[in-house]
Image: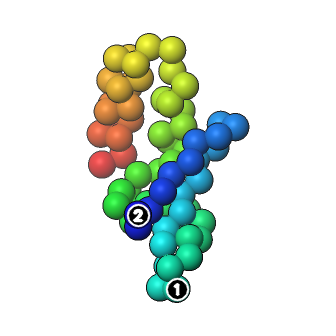
Amino acid sequence: MPEVWFWKSDQIKIFRLNATDEYEEVNRSGFFPNLDPTLLLQYIGHPDQYDAVAEFVQAIRKIS
């Protein structure tokens, strides 16, 4: 698995497999380099999934 994400204690941690086949923590995803994990955190715990997705889409459209 080249990249794994963990969500725990209101934090997202991303780990990528490096050249020596060890995982190292990185700030951004290699698959979603333009996605700010702190932005995603604002919507993960939202009580309504539909509203969370709609608001997240609006937020990333403003950034793009």
Picture layout, residue 59 above or below residue 17: above
Q: Secondary structure at mark 2?
A: loop
Residue at 51% x, 14% y: name it. 47
Q: How much space separates mark 2 and mark 1, taking CA atoms?
A: 14 Å
Count residues near mark 2 (Cα–Cα under 10 Å), then give few for <14, some for 14-19, many for 20+. few
Count residues near mark 1 (Cα–Cα under 10 Å), then give few for <14, some for 14-19, many for 20+. few
The tag on residue 1 is 2
Closer to the N terminus: mark 2 or mark 1? Answer: 2
Q: Which residue is mark 1?
A: 20
Residue at 34% x, 17% y: name it. 50
Q: Amino acid at mark 1?
A: Thr
Residue 41 located left or right of residue 59: right
Residue at 50% x, 79% y: name it. 21
Q: Amino acid at mark 2?
A: Met
Going by the picture, which residue comes out furthest to the bottom? Answer: 20
Picture layout, residue 38 above or below residue 30: above
Residue 50 located left or right of residue 19: left
Residue 46 locus on image (x, y percent): 51, 21
Residue 64 locus on image (x, y percent): 30, 48
Locate the N terminus and report the quarter of the image it occupies: bottom left
Q: Quadrant of residue 53?
A: top left
Picture layout, residue 43 above or below residue 19: above
Picture layout, residue 40 above or below residue 2: above
35 or 47, which is in the foreground? 47
